[in-house]
Amino acid sequence: MDFELTNEHTLIANSAKEFAKREIYPGLKERDEKATPDYTILKKMGEDGFLGICIPKKYGGLGMDYISLGLLCIEFEKIDSSARVVLSVHTGLNSLALLQWGNEEQKKKYLIPQAKGEKIAGFGLTEPNAGSDVFGIQSSAVLKGEHYILNGEKTWISLADVADNFLVFAYTDRQKGNKGISAFIVEKNFAGIVTSSIHGKLGVRAGNTGSISLQDAKIPKENLLGKEGDGFKIAMSALDNGRYTVAAGAVGIVEACLEASIKYAHDRETFGKEIGKHQLVQQMIAKMVAARDIGRLLTYNIGYLKNQGKRNTRETSLAKWIICNNAFESANDALQIFGAYGYSNEFDIERHFRNSRGAMIYEGTREIHTIMQAEYALGYRVDKPLENLLQAWPFKEDNI
């Protein structure tokens, strides 16, 4: 196992860093303060190929590997979580699910324009009374003729008011439990689809989050992803990809806090010396160094497994749990190092502190991942082989 980054990895990381500084950071403080997303940034992400970074060239992507996706998330979240969320939802949860489970017609119709950034995609699983409890969703789908009729309410949906297409989950047979959930490709302009935005969020305020209301929505039966009853498997495999991007992005928060803390520790003096000379400040910085290195290694390991086409549910859960916790602790320590200045939005630390807290909730709470890791260790949870695995890299289609 070789964790040395290739020249291509370094190139994509540097490109992402420059893009984030040039396109995302300007005006970010005002967008965050007023909670007003700039949707033109999404268009520029698509134009630069970032939204299809690890989608095969055959389907309009750049054809790069999954480690590249992780590096992209790190650099984007070093600036702001809202940029990384786009990659998590559009690419990780939706586009990679289409790549993994979609038929050729669905990939041509939906995956290609999404990989090119011509269409933006969302993911509709969470409901008002169903977050960690996936089986608790109330949405239903009934086949009538050539259409499924969907009814339900989805909430806390990233890009709800922005996305053109959603991957939506609903029961087609509630009596079958997890084998009764199905997945559907839903266009926002289908009849019966209404979206709205959620306001007053603590963090990720420069990004859009909202709700989807499905009221007798007519979905063509050819928009069923996989087979009826595959929805739970599709959702869990999609979360393996989404959680990977969240974990990788959290490394970006750790690094942003570490770099800012080092600079401030040299610039600020108390009791006649740099605050970096004080051992308790050193202790907090040392914790960030450990969090950075642990986060990088966990991220690279998952990218390696994905590149090999191997299932990585346990490893991704561990990374999401550990790195997101460490990101919040790093932001908390950085705020302490900055003192009163860290408590104001004069510095970016305050925004990273607020943003980092959300990652301990979405895409599986820290409590869910704690239980998962214990159950793996105790032998209560064992991953079964999936008949549909994410394509290994390099993609065969790109080598023809």
Image (cartoon, rainbow, N blue to C red):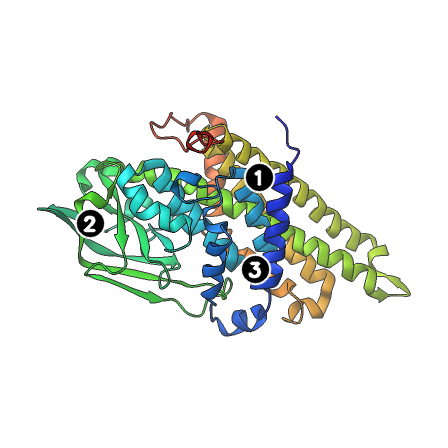
Residue shown at 77%/62% (left/top)?
264
Mark 3–mark 1 distance (CA, rounded to whole Å):
19 Å
Residue shown at 73%/52% (left/top)?
284
Q: Nearer the viewer, residue 206 or 61?
A: 61
Q: Are marks 1 and 2 in contact (CB under 8 Å)?
A: no
Residue shown at 56%/56% (left/top)?
356
Q: Nearer the viewer, residue 157 or 133?
A: 157
Question: Label 2: which residue?
Answer: 140
Question: Label 3: which residue?
Answer: 80
The x and y percentages for residue 130 are: 32, 51
On screen, residue 142 versus residue 362, left or right, reads: left
The x and y percentages for residue 9 are: 61, 41
Under tag 3, what secondary structure?
loop
On screen, residue 301 versus residue 195, left or right, reads: right
Type of amino acid at the residue the image marks with label 3:
Asp
Type of amino acid at the residue the image marks with label 2:
Ser
Mark 2–mark 3 distance (CA, rounded to whole Å):
36 Å
Q: Residues within 10 Å of mark 2 (few under 14, many from 20)?
A: many
Residue shown at 59%/64% (left/top)?
25
Question: Label 1: which residue?
Answer: 299
Under tag 2, what secondary structure?
strand
On screen, residue 358 versus residue 117, left or right, reads: right
Mark 1–mark 2 distance (CA, rounded to whole Å):
36 Å
Q: Quadrant of the N terminus?
A: top right
